Image (cartoon, grey):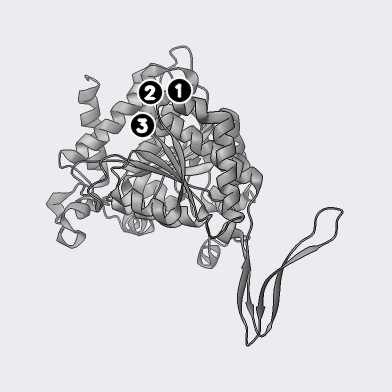
Amino acid sequence: MTRIIWGEDQGDTHLPLPQLWGHRDNVISAWSKARPPARAAWVDRYVVSLAAGATLSPVECLYYDLGLPYRDQTDDQVTIDAALAIKKHNVGIKCATITPDEERVEEFKLKKMWLSPNGTIRNILGGTVFREPILCKTIPRIVPGWTDAIVIGRHAHGDQYKATDMVLPGPGKVELVWTPNGGSPKATEVFTFKDGGGVAMAMYNTDESIRSFAHSSFQVALQKKWPLYMSTKNTIMKRYDGRFKDIFEEVFQKDYKGDFDKLGIWYEHRLIDDMVAQMLKSAGGFVWACKNYDGDVQSDIVAQGYGSLGLMTSVLMCPDGKTIESEAAHGTVTRHYREHQKGKPTSTNPIASIFAWTRGLEHRAKLDNTPELAKFCTTLEQACVDTVDSGKMTKDLAGCIHGIKNVKPDMYLNTMDFLQAIQENLDNKLGK
């Protein structure tokens, strides 16, 4: 862990801000121009230095290297340390990272195939990842009726993603067995295969995780001041999905109904198929809590419906409503990094990375009661949007407008020129 302090010492400081550095593919291309020896990415320096200047107070960053080589060197202890730092300081800002496959293990000569850093961090912090689109007037939406954002939360725990499945080679009986501590096994017949084999699967979730999911979802709805919908298929999976429905209702009635009533917002459970139809017909302006698989699918549909995954924020909200981790919704940009290695300029969209910083700093401002920092974050976000709406954008966004095959060099800026355009816009808004 390395400490980096941006800005001049003008007195009171913000609490430290854990910064989770990602892999080189994203660091060099999207966050650009690492600064030795501190190795703080250019976008980091750009956002944090401006924040320090706007608030006349230094911003201290605690730096954790989650690139594959250092994760391997520390046996992934750096990921655990980073998560614990977020838990301690209540805010973390993360760059995109790589979950290694067999090819990456060979490329980097790793000791083992390390787990997803996002999964490790979630397991330590708890909470739910919520995605929200960044709305630009000039970027066409596949669903034009979506005039407001839809914030979608995925309960990334259990269900199909932690299931045990098997191929059954022939006739036989499948049973689900539960053995209580200190008790006798209790078996429930699932299906008897008479004429041949087939497939079977068993999955699970926990009351604790579902309750954490509920608290995180209600906290986000309160912060956005938007209604919350939670979707299941409890008409078919009466006990499994019914448990989600019952826990959400219990948590809402006990802890959140009064606050929701004061804001004039509501919570409602809906069937997943009905919710998908309602989502497409709506104008947006709500929070949607999805089970694991539903959230995996629907979050990408929502992202594409608004125009671009490059215009999507991602925030891990913990059940206490106080601790968050923000990052860009997109992953690493290996193809752009390969171009960078050849010495070629890239047109990589940094907006989601900038918003990862502003959302984290905005939450820090809320915790520290520093409205000037919160105002700076809002102003910087608006500067990003206004820059795109003025016709200055990166290649991916130009492709959203013209079709990627029709994009010509004069329709977009490279990464550094685009960042410069944002800074000029921001300076104007700040009266510089």
The residue beneath circle 2 is 374
Residue 154's label in the rendered image is: none
Q: Quadrant of the C terminus?
A: top left
Among numbered discs 1 and 2, the one appearing first in the sequence = 1
In the rendered image, the vertical position of residue 196 relative to residue 286, given as above or below? below
Figure quadrant of residue 8: top left
Closest to the observer, 289 or 397: 289
In the rendered image, the vertical position of residue 47 relative to residue 333, given as above or below? above
Asked whether disc 3 touches disc 2, contact meaning CB atoms under 8 Å apart, the reply is no
Among numbered discs 3 and 2, the one appearing first in the sequence = 3
Q: Is residue 421 visible?
A: no
Asked whether disc 1 touches disc 3, contact meaning CB atoms under 8 Å apart, the reply is no
Q: Amino acid at mark 2?
A: Ala
Closest to the observer, 6 or 209: 209
- Secondary element at tag 3: helix
Q: Quadrant of the N terminus?
A: top right
The residue beneath circle 1 is 366
Residue 323, how many percent across, how many down?
54, 32
The answer to whether residue 77 is left or right of residue 19 is right
Q: CA distance from mark 1 to mark 3?
A: 18 Å
Residue 139, how many percent across, how many down?
21, 47
The answer to whether residue 183 is left or right of residue 54 is right
Q: Residue furthest right?
A: 182
Closest to the observer, 100 or 162: 162
- Secondary element at tag 2: helix
- Secondary element at tag 1: helix
The answer to whether residue 235 is left or right of residue 189 is left
Q: Amino acid at mark 3?
A: Val
Q: Is residue 185 visible?
A: yes
Asked whether disc 1 touches disc 2, contact meaning CB atoms under 8 Å apart, the reply is yes
Closest to the observer, 401 or 263: 263
